[in-house]
Image: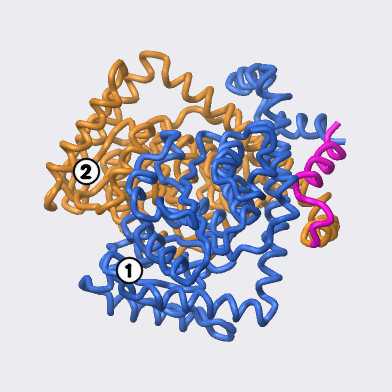
Chain colours: A orange, B blue
Amino acid sequence: MENIAEEVLMGNRYALAKAITAIENERENAMEIMQKLYPHTGHAYVLGITGPPGAGKSTLTDKLAKEYRRQGKTVGIIAIDPSSPFSGGAILGDRIRMNDLTLDDGVFMRSMGTRGSLGGLSHKTADAVKVMDAFGMDVIFVETVGVGQSEVDIVKAADTTMVVLIPGMGDDIQAIKAGILEIGDIFTINKADHDGADKLATELNMMLDLDGVMKEWRPPIMKTIANQNIGIAEVVETFGKHHNHIDGNGQLTVRRTERTKNEMLDLLDSRIGEHIRRNVVENGKIDKLVEEIKARRTDPYTEAAKIVSEMLK
Amino acid sequence: MENIAEEVLMGNRYALAKAITAIENERENAMEIMQKLYPHTGHAYVLGITGPPGAGKSTLTDKLAKEYRRQGKTVGIIAIDPSSPFSGGAILGDRIRMNDLTLDDGVFMRSMGTRGSLGGLSHKTADAVKVMDAFGMDVIFVETVGVGQSEVDIVKAADTTMVVLIPGMGDDIQAIKAGILEIGDIFTINKADHDGADKLATELNMMLDLDGVMKEWRPPIMKTIANQNIGIAEVVETFGKHHNHIDGNGQLTVRRTERTKNEMLDLLDSRIGEHIRRNVVENGKIDKLVEEIKARRTDPYTEAAKIVSEMLK
């Protein structure tokens, strides 16, 4: 394919897949593709879906996607694959998504993983969102597993973030819930027919009341049973309400400005990381230093300071 | 305190706490402390404990620490707090650890979180391990919650890594298990009296057999009931076996060399990150660029490339 970016802009799904693969694998043409697509971004609304493993996020996302399709919107889904940081490939991701959504031309679904690159996932996810945006998707879901730091970095790509929880999650859930209060614009208790759903809602409400004093938007707590399609339309309606809210009070602009800033910093990190790999790692310089450090003839702090002052103007 | 590093080397617990606080809060004296302590490191054996939330890792770690104490070894524990990436402080960490271990002078326990710094946790954890090592701890536990990329980065600080699982963990566990196969030297099924422990062991065994062809060390699967002290001595014995194994075949040296190398790269990242903050963020340069980018008059890829070529020699 001669010009991937142009083909993406013309609505070629195969080009869309190729562009994301180029990003994911850090191919040389990725930067050129992104430079060409960037002017055509900024139209899609980005929804972040996060929550602990087992909460049924992928089923829920699929149902939400279908509801948007019913409303005539095109949908992109980027699923951050939990296994990929380790094994370099999707294990569950694509398999469980082989449903009727994959036959719908208005939907494009893609799993992504880190494939061993250092902390590049949030930056790659942000780029994949932009490719789908330039392609013309109206709504883009970014779905992650877990609620760790990398997940938080990833949901920073979203305009509205929904945290999915399920009843009866065990000991550590208090700590996790405390952690996610700050990132959730909407909380959804999935599998709401299971025991403990009301208890979880009560706990969440208490924590949000405590946290939410003086906040303009009090995150609502939704209940769904995704595999029975219960509560889905209501969640989509709530996404719309949150969109309108942050659009109306200027928060959407603030969030997108902050996001652009973070993406710039991520890009700088990643470009400088490449420079370090070329000038310190690949030429074997670091291996010599490591031998000296291991022999305790010097220490990593002194040597890192030296390299940085040699490297920077 | 005039000289924190010297006090640490003389066995002053208060200095040990101050040194780790300096690292955690990125105080100016942190680098000097680390430079002074570094020559005195390399004696402790570092154990990584990871696994999903709710697996009972903290109870298990406490029991293992007690077993080491019974054998006359001094023990450091660094607990990476799950809530801290978000809220900036330990929520559970210190509270649930207020047990008899805290009264034992041969044990030093510390919770750590990211406190908002960008990806600095693995680097700070590695430094805290070194401080405890220089202080004279024989065994140092690094305990994380979750099995995401940040946790994997953190357990890279360990000589031997144990993955803790519990029976009946739900849908996503297959994906997680696949992910952790590569980092676990030892697998422990905690709460082994719960339903499904044998099933989990069988599944794990199958996956390890599939994965472990031609590997010198086949990760054993241990069973514990930590809160009843069952299986604890056996796990400690297995840690010893793994230590002997990797010591005998040279893997320990390889791992520690690799670790030193990764720590050097982390340090470089963090030092260059500081430089970026000073020269691009704090002087407002990035805010001007973001306005241009948001107006689509330029794109982040072009601007990042420009900054990097201006910044580097």
Residue ID for mark 2: A189
Please tell me whether the stretch drawn in magenta is mainly helix, strand or loop: helix
Q: Which residue is mark 1?
A: B190
Determine whether, in the image, residue B251 is placed left or right of residue A61: right
B71 vs A7, nearest the viewer = B71
Q: Identify the chain of the residue marked 2, using the numbered disc in the image.
A: A
Name the amino acid, label 2. Answer: Ile
**Residue A223 pos. (x, y %):** 18, 41
What is the chain letter for disc 1? Answer: B
Image quadrant where residue A231 sits? top left
Q: Which residues are magenta?
A: A295-313
Residue nearest the viewer, comparing B279 with A84: B279
The image position of residue B58, as x and y in percent, is 37, 57
Q: Are marks 2 and 1 on the same chain?
A: no
Say above or below: A118 vs B305.
Answer: below
Please provide percent x and percent y for residue B40.
Answer: 71, 55
Residue at point 55% right, 41% down? Answer: B14
Say if A71 sits above or below A97 in the image: above
Instruction: Kindly state the secondary structure of the residue where label 2 is placed.
Output: strand
Element type at mark 1: loop
- Compute the Cα span from label 2 to label 1: 28 Å
Crowdedness of circle 2 by 10 Å Cα count: few (<14), some, many (20+)? many
Q: Position of residue B165 (x, y in %)?
A: 36, 66
Mark 2 or 1: in front is: 1
- Is residue B15 at all visible to an observer of this figure? yes
Is the Cβ of the residue at disc 2 closer than 8 Å to that at disc 1? no
Please tell me which residue is depicted at 62% across the width and 53% down the height of the picture. Answer: B135
